[in-house]
Structure formats: C-alpha cells, structure tokens
Amino acid sequence: MKTFHDNTHSQGEKHPMKKRMLIMLAVVGLLFGGIFGFQIFKMQMIKKAMATQQIPPATVSTIRATIQPWQPELRAVGTLRAVRGVDVTTEISGLVRTLHFKSGDAVKTGQVLVQLNADADSAQLQASEASAELAQTVYERDKKQFAVKAVSQAVLDADVADLKSKRAIAAEQAAIVAKKSIRAPFSGRLGITTVNPGQYLNPGDKIVTLQALDNLYADFFLPQQQLANLSLGQKVIVTADSYPGRTFVGKISSINPKVDPETRNVQVEATIANPGQVLLPGMFATVQVQAGAVQKFLTVPQTAVAFNPYGETVFVVQEGEKGPDGKRGLIAKQVFVTTGGTRGDQVAIMKGIKDGDVVVSAGQLKLKNNNPVIINNQIVPSNEKSPKPIDD
C-alpha cells in the first residue's frame, strides 16, 4: 500500500519562513543603515565644528629687524706667549751661596739673582792676572833691550805670544767667575723657585722662570682660505675667560710663510698690549681679527632663525584677516631666509626679510604657518653683538 504526501501543505509551511527571513533582513538593513547614517552625520558635524573653530593664538616674543654696522671678523682660539720669556738656568756647576730675589719679584736687566760659590775661581783669577802682569813686564823690558840690539827678534816675539796667552787665560778665568753670578737677562717678573742656599746646581738646572709681561704674543691658526683677509698690522681683539667683559687690543705682527700641510691652517702671531700685566703666558684666549671695512647688514637674534635641513626660516608677524568682531589679529608667517655671518647673539640676514619687519625671537617652535599670535615682550632673548656673562 503506498502513502502520498500533501504537497499543498509543504508549500504552505515554506511561505511564512520566507516572510520571517525577509523581515529580519529588512530590520538588520535598517539597523545598519541607521548606524552608518548616524556615523556620517556625526563626522559631518565634527568637520563643520572644526571648520568653524579657530586655532588659539600662541604667545611669542618679537623683535624688529634693523640694519646695523657690521665689522667683518675672523675668530680663532689662541694661546698667549711672552714676548720674552725664559727659564733661568746656570751655565756652570756650583754651590748656591746666596739668593738675591724672592718668588714673584719684578727684576731689572742685569740684576744678580743667584750667587754661586766662587772662592777657588776668584783665587785662580788673581793668579792668572798676576801671570799676565809678569808677562807684560817681561815684554816691556825685552822691548827696550831689543831697541839697543841686546835681544833678538825671536825673544821679543816669544814675549808677545806669552803675554797674549797669559791674558787669554786671565780673561777665561774672569768669565768663569762672572758666570758664578747669575743675572736676569732682561726685565720681567720672576716665578716660583725651589732653589735654596747650599744647594748644588748642575749646568742646565732650572732656577726660576722669568717672563716679560708688558706685551704678549697671541699665537693662533686660521684656515688658508682666510689668507687674503690677513695683513701685517691688522687690528685684533683678545678676550680671556679669566677677565669676562674685558678686551685687550693688539695687531698682527707675523704670518707664518708656510701652511700646515696636514690641517691646511696658517699660524698667525699677534702682539697684544697687557696693561696691568694681568694676562699670563700659556693662557687660553679668543682672538677676533677685524678683516675688511665696516659694512651694513640686516640683523636679528640667532634665536629667531630655525636651521633646518631644507633651509633657514623665520616667522614674521603680520596682520591677519578680519575676525567676526571686525578686528584684525596678528599671525605669524613662515619665511625662508639666507643667513650670513654671526657675531655674539646676532646673525646677518642676506635675503628673505626687509628692514623693519617684526620677527618672532622666542616661541616659534610651537608655531605653524599663519598661526595667530599674541606678542609678549616682557622677557626677550639677548641681542648683543658682544655679549657678556651675567653673574647671578
């Protein structure tokens, strides 16, 4: 016996299932559509709010770019050296009898500094002088006898040779005695000595240093490219860390005729006046050589310039567009510049801005192009061509 299913009943069960799936899909579509629509609406509102929102102004310090006289300078690091300086030594050995100076004394040329024991040498000098006097007497007597043909020419020649020999021996001994008195070779200031009476000195032993301090040499090096800007008699200004704010004036006295083949630098020597003898040999010094005539350049503080791989820039403060209140605010406009030399806190601007432009000197790190700004110049960076240290 065969069983038959009712196809009409099966088809009736499928239709409600399709309806439910269509309704579910419609609900899901409406849900996702609502979510996406809300997100688009939110993004549009945020974009609209940001478009209407203004960038808050940044507080900066400013300075007006001005044209100033500019003396071209060459800077170098140098070492001071005495025009005349020496370590006083003894030429011959001997026992120190007396010291005629104290450490730090100022001495004159020829002043006796140390007296060595010269008793034996003085006695030998007296004997040599006596021998020379005897030879002189013999020569005078034989000279008279030769006049009357009592002695031969050979005897007289022997007397002359003996006299010269005895005088030479006496002179040599006198020189030895003189060397026992060690004198200052020139005027200057003595250093610290460790020599004491009773000490035995050998030739070359250092007794004390002697330095003439009225004038000093400043030795420094400059690149060979600067040779065209150097000449004898050129003015130089020297400063030392030991005396901040004080300058010492001199002039170039010598230029080495040879360039160092390893560094390609040339050595320059300048003579520096040393009033008060405050500078000392061996000190470190900064040398400024005034090269060329005075020029005029547009200058700004070095803090105003941003040095970047793609070029140097500054921010110039200008008036912006009118706001809702009808007033014009200030904006900072970024400008590319070409920089020149530097001196102290300043840098020369060769191209990019003009005289009178208001330039941001502090606070530019937080700026972007056309950023609104507020000027506050209560504290501004230094803008000195010759800055001096400030003691707290």
Image: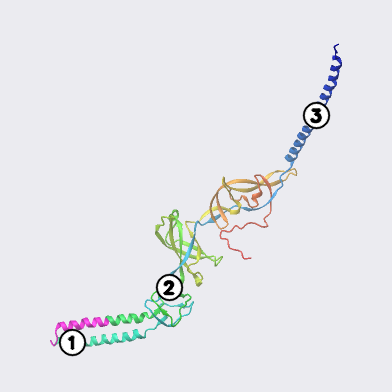
Seen at 73% across and 39% down, the residue is: 51
Q: In this view, does 29 lie above or below 133?
A: above
Which residue is under mark 3?
Answer: 28
| Label 3, label 2: how far apart the Cα atoms are | 103 Å
Give the number of the mark in front: 1 or 3.
3
Residues rendered magenta in the picture: 149-167
Task: Decide which of 136, 287 is in the foreground and name it.
Answer: 136
In the rendered image, residue 149, in percent from the top left (x then y), is placed at 12, 86
Residue receiving disc 1: 142
Mark 1 or mark 3: whose residue is earlier in sequence: 3
Q: In this view, does 14 lie to the left or right of 171?
A: right
- In the picture of the structure, the residue carrying the numbered disc 2 is 87
Q: Do the residues labelled 1 and 2 touch (CB within 8 Å)?
A: no
For marks 3 and 2, the one nearer the N-term is 3
Residue 166 magenta: yes
Which quadrant is home to the C terminus?
A: bottom right
Q: Position of residue 253 (x, y in %)?
A: 42, 63
Rendered residue at 64%/45% (across/down):
333
Q: What predominant SS class does the magenta segment belong to? A: helix
Q: Earlier in the sequence, mark 1 or mark 2?
A: 2
Number of marks drawn: 3
Residue 98 position by quadrant: bottom left
